[in-house]
Amino acid sequence: MSQQELQTAGHRLHNSSPLFLFIEAIKKMVFPLLLGIIGTSGDKQDWIIIGVAALASVMTIVQFWFYHYWLEEDRLVVKEGILFKSLRQVPYERIQNLNVEKNVLHRLFGVATLQVESASGAKPEAVIRVISQDQVAHIQNIIKQRAKPALVESDVVEVASEAVEHPALYQMSHKDVATYGFISHKALVPIGIVGSVLSQNDYYRDRFVGMISGFAGDLHVEQWAVSEWLVYSSAFALLMLVTIWLSSIAMAFLKLHGFTLSHPDNNLHADMGLLTRLTANIPVRRIQLIKLKHSPLHRLFKKVSIKMETAGGVTEQSGITMSWLAPLVSEPDGFELIKQIQPEVDLLRTDWQPLESRAWKRVFKKGLFFILLIMAPLIYFFEGWGLLMLLLIPPAYAYAQAYIRHAAYAVTDELIACRQGVFFRRLSVVRIGKIQNVSYLQTPFDRRNGMARLTVDTAGSNPVTQDINVHYLNQDKVSHLVQQLTEQVSQVKFIW
Amino acid sequence: MIRPVLLPDIMQTNELTQLQSGYLKITRITWAIVVMLIAVGPTILISAIIDFGWLYRILTYVLTWLLFFILMWWYTKHWFRVYGYALQPTGLRIHRGLFWQQQHLVPRNRVQHIDITTGPLERRFGLSQLVVHTAGTRNASVTLPGLKHDDAVALRKALINTAQMDDTV
């Protein structure tokens, strides 16, 4: 920061900014309200609520005149607020993510939304909505130049720093995007919501039935035989499935069209989107955790999805997020990609350790317990037919065997990794330097079998599903691992 | 890279240190109050099944309270026995849990900040609670209750690594 004088004013937002602020306010406040009304009444009092919301959203536009930001020697400063003023200072080297969003309207005005994220909290550190694209490039440049870590990064190979055009590490072809859309089934939930809302509303249901009968003639449902029911319902199911697939693929194209990941100067740079272009910049050293996932559908195409986690809890609701390393890639290519980004994370040559082989019994017993739990009420209601549940025992046995066969963990000088899951498999890797704390957990069942669970906590990991979580290990091994990891962590002083 | 962390000798040990016995008393007082609420349920249930006078209802309440409290007394005794911590050269280790056992290890150089809190009951017994925060998510803060206030301050001093200049996120 300049010693001689403190700046108190800086750049203003772009002149078209109120428009974008207004659109954002509508998206956040009016639209959800409207959606609620369609599903329910539509009476006059609802308009009062909408009026209040509209007034509030107009108020958000006024903040445009009170929003200033400027770039200092070592930090970005944002000053905002009408009655309650705030002055926010974000040191460049603490910036985790830098996301830029450009939709069609943005491009029309030659502007973009810039979001700056640090490791703190659930909200982005600053959302600059909107500034001209030249200004965005300028800010990106300054942050990139000045966000030098205090220490030399000896372990990171600087390959790309010389080249002017950074070659893409990974690119998605149209085929990949379409396949991803098919695999992800992203449209399932929205279509389900729309369907259930419409079926609850008498007016829309009648219109839908009317439309169908206008289209296919009167179907005389009351005269249907079983075969007719079968044909029509399977046709309907197929129609729904195709709709979901097609809209999922469309959604994938909107989001991931032209996904490109490059790696200039120890930064990850991702670019994607069809109508709304999203550009994300993340320093490689900020990656906390890398996750590979594959579902049965992924395996059909012999592909995996790779995501990363950075610190800070910005979600889709609270801001712009980008956590992809590669939405769809073959597993060996994915390993190679991770290795290029973080040379010390070499998953191809990781020495995977199995779980205790006797642990399949525990997974099997758990399965049996659930079968019994479901069977008890079934027998009560359907008597002998409930025993059909026993047919699930062989699959439960196979599941238990598969669970132990697929699960594994690895601890090296550089990383800890674990693999889990039978149908939906995932592989998580954390570098030793990113471990925040280590835990040893043992249930009474574990103790009877001399086993325990090892968990590792990192910044930015999902608090619900702890990603590094190795269960069914010998308790002595876990005790040893816990000590070893703590020692390793406390020796890694400089984690980048 | 590897620099041994210098610490006061008394603080460095692999042995588990037990919590102050005052903390057991605090826990039991808390339980005594909680059990007062728990005992309401069975009392209502029994009074609904067997129809008897107010005196017996109160007696049932007191007896269920006593029963639960004795169970808690026994449980907390063993629970307290296994609750402990150790300040290792690498960081803080906390053991707890009787049936579901947990060990948390917080490496010294991952500590973000440390709080010391003291509740009204704890103040009576001259105890404090140490809350160690890391940048993690699920175990972002690890609490260590039942410390003498001076011990808590000493632990905080020993854990906060002032020599570290870089951030760990």
Image (tube, coloured by chain):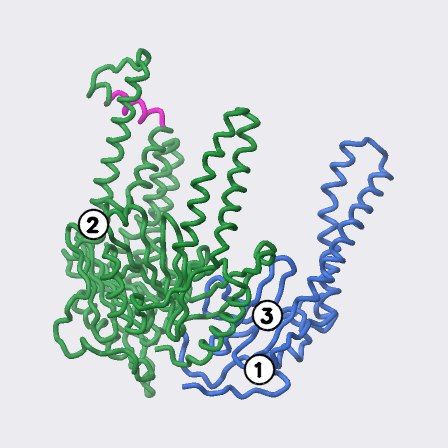
Depicted B143 relative to depicted A208: above or below: below
> Nearer the N terminus, badge 1 or badge 3?
3
Q: Are marks 3 and 2 in contact (CB under 8 Å)?
A: no
Label 2, residues with CA under 10 Å away: few <14, some 14-19, many ≥20: some
Which SS class for mark 1?
helix
Q: What residue type is labelled 1?
A: Lys
Q: Does the magenta stretch include residue B44?
A: no
Between A439 and A33, which is closer to the camera in this rendering? A439
A404 over A151 or under it: above or below: above
Q: In this view, does A465 lie to the left or right of B7?
A: left
Q: Indicate the quadrant containing the N terminus of chain A: top left, top right, bottom left or bottom right.
A: bottom left
Residue A347 in view in this figure:
yes
Q: Where is residue B125 in the image (x, y as percent from the top left)?
A: 74, 71
In this view, A354 is above or below A10: above
Q: Residue at x 69, y 62 (%)?
A: B79
Find the magenta span and give its range: A201-211
Q: Which disc, if any, is residue B157? A: 1
In which image quadrant can residue A109 be found? bottom left
Residue for point 35% across, 28% down:
A199
Q: How far is the residue under mark 2 from the one under mark 1? A: 53 Å
At label 3, counting other C-alpha atoms closer than 10 Å, the crowd grade (few under 14, some 14-19, many 20 or more) is many
Q: What residue type is labelled 2?
A: Leu
- Disc 2 marks which residue? A254
